Amino acid sequence: MAICVLVGLTAGSYVPVLWGASAFGFQSLILGALGGVVGVWCGVKLND
């Protein structure tokens, strides 16, 4: 499950870079947190 969270955090943090925003901005922080939540959800679903 930790790998799913790590992938979700990384992917979510990188999304703003695709539209030209900073990788260290507020958008990356918010989308990284959202990606982490999605990663937890995917990890739980994979464990079932």
Image (cartoon, rainbow, N blue to C red):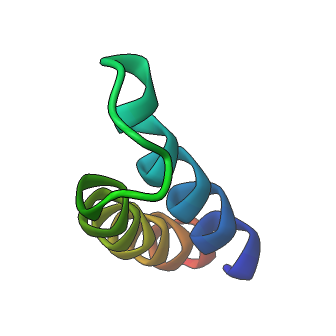
Q: Residue 24 location, x and y as percent?
A: 47, 58
Is the residue 45 above or below the residue 7 in the image? Answer: below
Residue at the spot x=46%, y=53% of the render?
A: 13
Residue at the spot x=55%, y=72% of the render?
A: 43
Q: Residue 10 location, x and y as percent?
A: 60, 55
Q: Quadrant of the N terminus?
A: bottom right
Residue at the spot x=25%, y=63% of the render?
A: 26
Residue at the spot x=51%, y=41% of the render?
A: 14
Is the residue 39 above or below the residue 11 in the image? Answer: below
The single residue placed furthest to the top in the displayed view is: 19
Q: Residue 8 location, x and y as percent?
A: 52, 58
Q: Could you say which quadrant of the image residue 45 lies in? A: bottom left
Q: Residue 47 or 4: which is nearer the viewer?
A: 4
Is the residue 35 above or below the residue 3 in the image? Answer: above
Q: Residue 7 location, x and y as percent?
A: 65, 56
Q: Residue 27 or 8: which is nearer the viewer?
A: 27
Q: Is residue 8 left or right of residue 29?
A: right
Q: Could you say which quadrant of the image residue 3 lies in? A: bottom right
**Total count of labels:** 0
Q: Is residue 33 left or right of residue 4?
A: left
